Amino acid sequence: MTDAADLTARLIRCPSVTPDEGGALTLLADMLTAAGFEVTRVDRGGTPNLFARWGPKGARTLGFNGHTDVVPPGDPGSWTHPPFSGHVKDGTIWGRGATDMKSGVAAFVAASIDFVTETPPDGAVILTITGDEEGPSRDGTIAILDWMETQGERMDACIVGEPSNPTRMGEMMKTGRRGSATFRIRATGVQGHVAYPHRAKNPLHALTRFLADLIAAPLDQGTEHFDPSGVQITSVDCGNPASNVVPETARAVVNIRFNDLHSGESLTQDLTRRARAIGDETGVALDIEADISGEAFLTEPGPFVDLVRDVVARETGQVPVLSTSGGTSDARFVKDHCPVVEFGLVGRFMHQVDERVPVAQIHQLKTIYQRILERFFE
Ligand SMILES: N[C@@H](CCC[C@H](NC(=O)CCC(=O)O)C(=O)O)C(=O)O
Ligand SMILES: [Zn+2]
Ligand SMILES: [Zn+2]
């Protein structure tokens, strides 16, 4: 029997902060090869990716998708146990990626290995695992899916193992996601002496006004299937070491998670219009670079959603709600290929200091994935 908790701890010990592979995909490739999977590294543009199939190409196929890259740990000194220690204590595993989402990957890898070994199905299981979900994601899951198309590889349905439950196992499945857009704003003014501001144009004044206006009112109140859109300023910077100089330039980064009232294009137009208005008034040029990493999408209920919901309800005693809340995920790429739903662990500690996961939850998730495999191939 493959121990998903032990595999989680071993994966945490691989320092795989995006874009570093850290040994995580190599570890999985070796395990899957030994278990009879056909394993291919599908790296693109320096991004490490793994494709693994058990069973014949073209057969009825259930897919799993996940990522082994993790966000930076921040100050390691703030952690109770070092972030890449995979420390196990009192039934809890500590470390970056404990919930997001080395445990999810470990659970579906362990479930798949045991399932095909113990009860080989009349069909195939495909695992797509990327080393860049947290970063730009341009050469991650999407590269694996592109490669699969060239090879005639396909999935009939796919589960993304991102942590989907807010506080308890069984509460929530994700059947869609809000879109994500990052805007980099560069303000260019005129440098000058702070005591002679009439000879300068302060880019920070224009930029902070632009930012303050942007967060002053919510973009919307949410829609039937989506939470309200959210705007977060993630960086304001001008690198000015002098307190008596008005700097020439300043930069900011804004990330917007948006619902189906917006698109990447409509938001880009809106922000550009706001920037022009402030630029015209202040004489400071505000240039915007947009990076749309995904549009909002919704997976309509259907047999696969029902199957996963039913298994989760039986195993946890709770019928999960179908939600599009939270961040984004690689389901936004998979949805163009086959029905996709997301179910994973409790995400309470993701991206936080002292990220950790109860061992029992990992075992429960592995069982749920095994039951889904059984039902899918019944
Ligand atoms: N850099 C991309 C993709 C970032 C993906 C990331 N996803 C998660 O952390 C999972 C969160 C969840 O399951 O709710 C994110 O949402 O930042 C981008 O910024 O779009
Ligand atoms: Zn994740
Ligand atoms: Zn994440």
Image (spheres, helix red, strand yellow):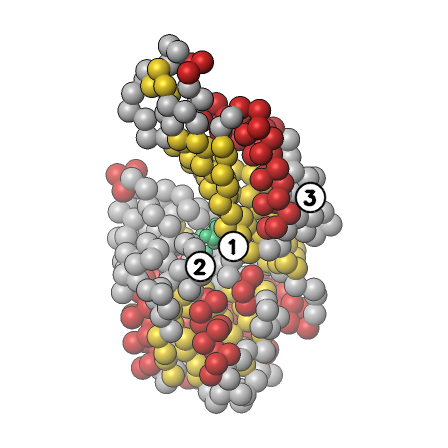
Residue plotted at (56% across, 61% down): 332
Q: Quadrant of the C terminus?
A: bottom right
Q: Position of residue 171 (x, y in %)?
A: 60, 54
Residue denoted by label 3: 222
The amino acid at mark 2 is Ser
> Residue 332, relative to residue 227: is it above or below?
below
Residue 204 falls left or right of residue 308: left
Q: Secondary structure at mark 3?
A: loop
Q: Position of residue 95 (x, y in %)?
A: 33, 51
The answer to which of 337 and 273 lies nearer the viewer is 273
Residue 316 falls left or right of residue 356: right
N-terminal of the pair, mark 3 or mark 1, is 3
Please give the label number shown on residue 249.
Answer: none
Residue denoted by label 2: 137
Q: Secondary structure at mark 1?
A: strand
Residue plotted at (27% across, 42% down): 76
Measured in 3D between alpha carbons, the distance from the residue under mark 2 to the one under mark 1, in whole angstroms, is: 8 Å
> Residue 2, relative to residue 73: is it above or below?
below
User: How many residues crowd around disc 1 within 10 Å: few (fewer than 14), some, or many (20 or more)?
Assistant: some
